[in-house]
Image: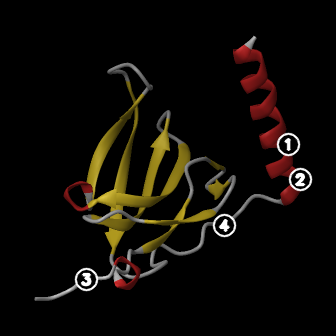
Amino acid sequence: MIRVYPSLIHSLKCHACAISVLNKCAIGLKMDCKSGQQCYTGKGKKVGFIDAMEKGCLDVGDCNRTASVNVPGTEAAVYSMTRTCCTTDLCNSAPTSLPAVLQLALASVAAVFGANALV
């Protein structure tokens, strides 16, 4: 009988960036992927000319493909994103972060809009 101890199972660790401004990560994090996922870097152009970038974990079946990114809750395509995967810890390179003052400003704006949505 072979025993598998959960603490010995290694999940892939990746850089994560969901929001980018001027191709720089607004808030860079690290995340652990689930089984069947790999690290990825996505690149595209919003409205045909504004650079878009994202990083994180992606299901293997969605790797190395170009897909349309839709407006949430609709079928309206906003832009296409090419997602390229890699298979070692933090292989999707550290996201370039915005200066701290811009991160704070972006977080403040998000907090105001979030608070208004609750009212």
Q: Amino acid at mark 4?
A: Thr
The colour style of the image is: secondary structure
Which disc, if any, is residue 66?
Answer: none
Residue at 10% over, 89% down:
1
Is the C-beta separation of discs 3 and 2 under 8 Å?
A: no
Say what amino acid the circle numbered 3 marks. Answer: Val
Category of crowding for the residue at label 3, using alpha-carbon neighbours closer than 10 angstroms: few (below 14), some (14–19), many (at least 20): few
* Separation of residues labelled 4 and 1 (CA atoms): 17 Å
Task: Give whichever of discs 1 and 3 has the lower sequence position.
Answer: 3
For this rendering, which residue is in front, 95 or 108?
108
Q: Residue at x 65, y 57 (%)?
A: 25
What secondary structure is found at the residue carrying circle 4? loop
The quadrant holding residue 36 is: bottom left
Among all residues in the image, which is located at the extreme top? 119
The image's mark for residue 96 is 4
Q: Is residue 44 above or below residue 86?
A: above
Pointer 3: what residue?
4
